[in-house]
């Protein structure tokens, strides 16, 4: 009986706590301080028990989201630790207040928990990022004024690599951008205005791409931006505006371009980022393969397919494939195939010679110490060996044709054609594959040269 009464009391107590908690959230939505005080008087631990609930949002999140200043103050007076709580999106109450432009609430939250200004949500955005994206100018000012290091906040990047300056341009928030630019200029940090995002773009580049004429004009009025991001343009600002009008018309097209660039990097970059010991391993492999090919091709000349004449022989015997006159004398030591199928023997010797000379060239370069031990030259030598192996494959097929009788060739014709087609296809794929890598390396080298040239021009200008 006593146990049942105890369970009933506990159950009623839980129901009462649930009702109070529900009333607390309703009070937060309405901003009712009187209701909050009454609930706190009835249950002094109501705020402390919030950590035991399954809801990721606290009443302070709700009040900050809706801009209820007095309710926010009342909650913080009793439990300031709630200012550090994060919801399911890893947003603090300061994130919500900043995103919705509640400047007074932002100020109160900063007083309670100053470190909230550097907390990032799931997408790596700070309260300053959210305020700038939505053009909350007063909130941006408050966050900058109250920050001991506004420069750090302005340069902190999201997970996508955007600083608050880039976000102002991407979301076309010119007023917020002006506040940030002026703040950096006052702190003598205007050189940071030319910082780049993950794609290597400054905010000026984005403004031109997005055809934001007012933003472009404003940025061109800032000396540091004009000398930095627009250094390649003439002093006539109309050139920049002409470029802007020829650029993509919306953010979606820029996003697609960035996605294509990322896909290109994901596909190609891993192919050219070799392990640190790749050069030494490749040198050893190339030398082994080249030595093997040289030995095979050398032996093919001394012992050609079909053998050699053991003694001087007059071609007066029966051979359906003999292409020479009966009066010709076959000299001892000469290849038999050279007499009864000269064209195919000639092809055989050409392919065999190419394979032999290619392998000797690789061996000579590796043994002599030239070329230098770098990835590009190793790649070139690898291509030479691949070409050499290709000629070796063609040599084998021609040799098989030379030593096979006509009745066997008629049955092997499908196999031979299939082998040639497969081998040619494989060679073609490798050619395209390596052409893509070569184009990427050339493009990368060209960009680095241009960047070095721009840096040199800037150095001379200063």
Image: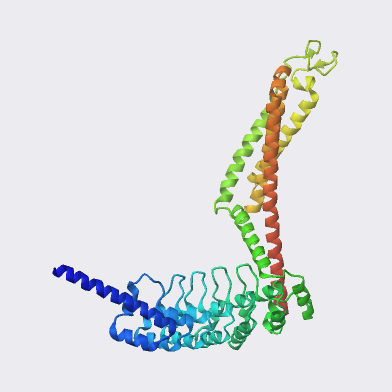
The picture places residue 173, in percent across and down from the top left corner, at 63, 80
Residue at 34% over, 74% down: 51
Front-most of residues 433 and 145? 145
Which residue occupies the foreground of this view, 209 or 402? 209
Question: Can residue 334 be seen from the camera position used here?
Answer: no
Horizontally, residue 439 falls left or right of residue 328, namely left
| Quadrant of the snapshot with the C terminus | bottom right
Left or right? Give the position of 158 relative to 224: left
Q: Where's residue 249, x and y in %?
A: 72, 70
Q: Residue furthest left?
A: 1
**Residue plotted at (76% across, 32% down):** 350
Of residue 328 and residue 397, the one placed in the foreground of this image is 397
Residue nearer the viewer, 402 or 262? 262
> Which residue does the image show at 66% across and 46% down from the upper left?
381
Vertical comparison of 343 with 261: above or below: above
Q: How many marks?
A: 0
Q: Height in image: 311 above or below 430?
A: above
> In the picture, residue 74 is in which quadrant?
bottom left
């Amino acid at each position: 009986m006593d146990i049942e009464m105890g369970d009933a009391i506990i159950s009623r107590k839980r129901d009462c706590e649930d009702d109070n908690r529900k009333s607390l959230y309703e009070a937060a939505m309405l901003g009712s301080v009187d209701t909050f005080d009454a609930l706190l008087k009835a249950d002094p631990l109501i705020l402390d028990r919030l950590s035991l609930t399954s809801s990721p949002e606290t009443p302070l999140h709700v009040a900050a989201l809706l801009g209820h200043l007095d309710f926010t103050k009342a909650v913080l007076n009793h439990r300031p630790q709630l200012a550090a709580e994060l919801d399911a999106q890893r947003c603090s109450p300061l994130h919500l207040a900043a995103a919705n432009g509640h400047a007074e609430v932002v100020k109160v939250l900063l007083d309670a928990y100053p470190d909230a200004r550097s907390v990032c949500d799931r997408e790596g955005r700070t309260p300053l990022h959210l305020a700038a994206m939505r053009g909350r100018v007063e909130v941006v000012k408050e966050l900058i004024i109250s920050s001991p290091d506004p420069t750090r906040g302005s340069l902190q990047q999201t997970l996508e690599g955007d600083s608050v300056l880039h976000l102002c341009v991407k979301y076309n928030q010119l007023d917020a951008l002006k506040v940030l630019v002026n703040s950096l200029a006052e702190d003598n940090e205007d050189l940071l205005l030319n910082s780049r995002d993950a794609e290597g773009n400054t905010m000026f580049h984005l403004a031109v791409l997005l055809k934001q004429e007012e933003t472009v004009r404003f940025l061109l009025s800032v000396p540091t931006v004009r000398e930095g991001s627009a250094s390649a343009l003439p002093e006539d600002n109309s050139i920049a505006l002409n470029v802007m009008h020829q650029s993509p018309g919306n953010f979606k097209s820029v996003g697609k371009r960035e996605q294509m660039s990322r896909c290109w990097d994901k596909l190609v970059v891993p192919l050219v980022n070799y392990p640190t010991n790749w050069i030494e391993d490749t040198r050893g492999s190339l030398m082994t393969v080249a030595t093997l090919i040289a030995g095979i091709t050398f032996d093919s000349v001394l012992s050609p397919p079909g053998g050699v004449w053991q003694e001087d022989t007059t071609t007066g015997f029966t051979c359906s494939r003999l292409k020479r006159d009966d009066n010709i004398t076959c000299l001892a030591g000469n290849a038999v195939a050279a007499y009864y199928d000269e064209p195919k023997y000639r092809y055989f010797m050409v392919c065999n010679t190419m394979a032999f000379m290619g392998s000797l060239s690789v061996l000579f370069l590796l043994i002599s110490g030239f070329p230098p031990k770098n990835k590009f030259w190793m790649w070139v030598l690898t291509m030479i060996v691949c070409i050499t192996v290709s000629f070796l494959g063609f040599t084998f097929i021609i040799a098989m044709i030379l030593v096979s009788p006509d009745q066997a060739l008629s049955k092997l014709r499908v196999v031979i054609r299939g082998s040639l087609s497969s081998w040619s296809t494989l060679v073609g794929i490798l050619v395209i594959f390596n052409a893509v890598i070569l184009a990427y390396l050339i493009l990368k080298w060209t960009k680095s040269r241009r960047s070095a040239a721009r840096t040199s021009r800037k150095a001379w200008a200063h």
